[in-house]
């Protein structure tokens, strides 16, 4: 009898910091939806990551529910897969502390995202912001996840998670082997980077990532924007004087054009080559009109469903609690085994 193929386990998360936008949707959420068909998935609202910088408590609660609503409105099925918020499973924080004692300062000092977020005033940044890559590693490894959908800017953090897993496996190799894990206890998770719009840039500056923290709302398309707002933002998106090229190579020195073509390709679930076959040598006015129509068709139903779900916070909280219960069932035995390997006495 042929042995059944083991399904891979995917973990990923989104921070609840408000103003979910097109970059979150194309760079993460659409990937989450597609991965449901081939993997066992855990999708987490990472509220512990959010508090590495100060969050208004009421806003944090609202934003956690909003991300959950966005997951579901976009097509993630919380009955088939696990949707929960990070702080309801204490194993994330417990394993992160163990990893704080495994990871090396030199590794954390190389994390470019801390340097970007802390800016010049590094001494005033929270300790949590500095060590949060270790918490990210704990998020993944607490479930022995094998794959993580990541954008280009998160690849470095996944590499750190692999380094931590490898060092833990090496440091405790003898104990791990005695416990019955001769190949190592933690897997080395692999990245899943797919699609033409893994990194969506600002509508006003093709060299800057689309961000929920940008002061100008015109830099991004929010998932809750209506059709008129979407059309206005795309119409005013920065471009250059030349028509679109007919080949992808022609986008290389044109960041704004490249960004808009990537957005169209992501929304249409196609390639940049296909987009340029249709719109190559066309003026931006025609392309933007088509892009606005496509974006509205894809995003306005999601925004409408998000608003419907947000009107029933009790149901959202029920979904998160049920997801946390199911997440505990996977995480608790792995955390218990980790403590045994390290030598921590537990009841």
Image (cartoon, grey):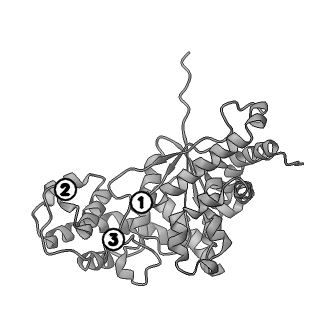
- Please provide percent x and percent y for residue 135: 65, 59
Count of numbered badges drawn on the protein: 3
Closer to us: 92 or 102: 102
Q: Quadrant of residue 104?
A: bottom right
Residue at x-position 63% and y-position 43%: 166
The residue most toward the bottom is: 215
Residue at x-position 74% and y-position 41%: 172
Q: Which residue is mark 2?
A: 249
Label 1 or label 3, whichever lies nearer to me, is 3
What distance separates the C-alpha of mark 3 from that of mark 2?
A: 17 Å
User: Callout 3: helix, strand or loop?
Assistant: loop
User: Callout 2: helix, strand or loop?
Assistant: helix
Q: Which residue is mark 1?
A: 27
Q: Which residue is mark 3?
A: 207
What distance separates the C-alpha of mark 1 from that of mark 2?
A: 22 Å
* The N terminus, quarter of image: top right
């Amino acid at each position: 009898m042929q042995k059944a193929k083991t399904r891979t386990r995917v973990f990923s998360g989104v921070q609840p910091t408000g103003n979910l936008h097109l970059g979150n949707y194309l760079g993460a959420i659409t990937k989450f939806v597609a991965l449901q068909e081939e993997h066992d998935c855990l999708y987490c609202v990472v509220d512990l990551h959010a508090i590495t910088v100060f969050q208004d408590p009421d806003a944090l609660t609202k934003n956690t529910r909003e991300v959950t609503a966005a997951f579901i409105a976009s097509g993630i099925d919380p009955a088939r897969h696990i949707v929960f918020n990070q702080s309801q499973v204490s194993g994330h924080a417990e394993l992160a502390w163990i990893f704080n004692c495994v990871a090396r300062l030199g590794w954390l000092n190389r994390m470019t995202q801390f340097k970007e977020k802390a800016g010049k005033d590094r001494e005033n940044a929270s300790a949590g912001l500095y060590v949060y890559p270790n918490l990210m590693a704990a998020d993944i490894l607490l479930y022995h996840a094998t794959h993580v959908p990541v954008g280009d800017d998160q690849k470095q953090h996944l590499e750190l998670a692999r380094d931590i897993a490898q060092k833990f496996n090496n440091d405790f190799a003898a104990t791990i082997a005695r416990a019955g894990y001769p190949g190592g206890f933690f897997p080395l998770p692999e990245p899943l980077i797919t699609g033409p719009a893994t990194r969506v840039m600002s509508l006003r500056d093709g060299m800057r990532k689309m961000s929920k923290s940008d002061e100008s709302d015109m830099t991004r398309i929010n998932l809750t924007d209506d059709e008129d707002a979407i059309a206005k933002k795309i119409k005013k998106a920065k471009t250059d004087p030349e028509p679109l090229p007919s080949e992808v190579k022609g986008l290389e020195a044109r960041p704004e054009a490249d960004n808009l073509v990537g957005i169209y390709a992501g929304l249409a679930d196609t390639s940049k080559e296909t987009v340029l076959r249709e719109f190559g040598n066309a003026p931006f006015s025609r392309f933007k009109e088509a892009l606005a129509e496509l974006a509205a068709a894809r995003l306005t139903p999601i925004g409408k469903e998000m608003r419907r779900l947000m009107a029933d916070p009790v149901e959202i909280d029920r979904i998160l609690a049920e997801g946390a219960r199911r997440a505990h069932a996977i995480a608790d035995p792995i955390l218990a085994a980790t403590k045994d390997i390290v030598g921590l006495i537990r009841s």
